[in-house]
Image (spheres, rainbow, N blue to C red):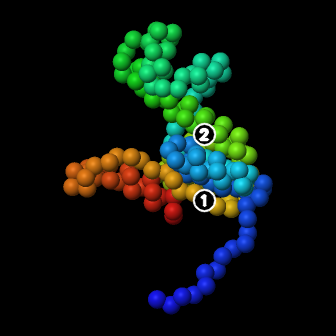
């Protein structure tokens, strides 16, 4: 191996910088973006598949666990059909995670916009990129943390499952 100096950029992010964060509202990414926002309080465009639900009265935002959401839906909203209850539990839980992530990053100093776009949908993803460039005039960086968790041993994985996981990681790179 030949040791060569590594070129580094001295450019730093500033308050006008724009970062596109794919998969930025769930998992470990919000924690990383919160820490980044402390040092570099810039514009963070979080992109995820889930759409936050409207909770104008704040009834759902105080529910922190799936069990508490389920209990609320059964007792207060008087839902009865298990499949419908579970579907709404998942929607509220994900929405609460998104809203909590946004709050945490904003508390750290970041300016957050959340966009609901599936990065596997190339047409919609390209439209989002165009929209961001029109609004901000630039994209200074991308954090690609989007992913679909479908863990199985490779020899047990269905092609459709592999394709979903793969496309989520690869499509945004085109």
Q: Is residue 6 above or below residue 98?
A: below
State left or right for residue 69 relative to residue 61.
Answer: left
Image point (44%, 12%), residue name = 74
Answer yes or no: is residue 124 visible: no
Mark 2 Cα shell of 10 Å, populated few (<14), some (14-19), many (≥20): many
Return the x and y of residue 53 as percentages of the image width and height.
57, 28
State left or right for residue 162 relative to residue 170.
Answer: left
Q: Which mark is residue 142?
A: 1
Q: Secondary structure at mark 2?
A: helix
| Snapshot quadrant of residue 111 | top right
Q: Which one is in front, 41 or 127?
A: 41
Looking at the image, is mark 1 or mark 2 nearer the viewer? 2
Q: Is residue 171 above or below residue 118?
A: below
Residue at numbered disc 2: 101
Mark 1 Cα shell of 10 Å, populated few (<14), some (14-19), many (≥20): few
Total numbered circles: 2
Answer yes or no: is residue 99 visible: yes
Image point (45%, 57%), residue name = 169
State left or right for residue 106 relative to residue 118.
Answer: right
Image point (22%, 51%), residue name = 156
Whichever of labels 1 and 2 marks the residue nearer the N terminus, that label is 2
Return the x and y of residue 134 as percentages of the image width and height.
72, 54
Q: Secondary structure at mark 1?
A: strand
């Amino acid at each position: 191996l030949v040791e060569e100096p590594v070129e580094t950029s001295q450019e730093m992010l500033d308050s006008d910088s724009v970062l596109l964060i794919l998969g930025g509202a769930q998992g470990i990414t919000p924690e990383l973006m919160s820490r980044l926002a402390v040092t570099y309080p810039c514009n963070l465009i979080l992109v995820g598949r889930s759409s936050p639900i409207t909770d104008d009265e704040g009834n759902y935002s105080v529910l922190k666990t799936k069990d508490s959401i389920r209990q609320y839906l059964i007792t207060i909203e008087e839902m009865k059909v298990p499949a419908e209850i579970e579907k709404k539990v998942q929607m509220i839980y994900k929405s609460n995670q998104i809203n909590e992530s946004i709050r945490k990053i904003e508390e750290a100093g970041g300016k957050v916009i959340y966009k609901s776009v599936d990065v596997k949908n190339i047409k919609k993803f390209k439209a989002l990129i165009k929209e961001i460039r029109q609004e901000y005039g630039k994209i200074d960086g991308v954090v690609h943390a989007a992913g679909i968790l479908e863990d199985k041993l490779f020899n047990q994985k269905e092609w459709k499952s592999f394709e979903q996981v793969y496309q989520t990681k690869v499509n945004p790179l085109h």
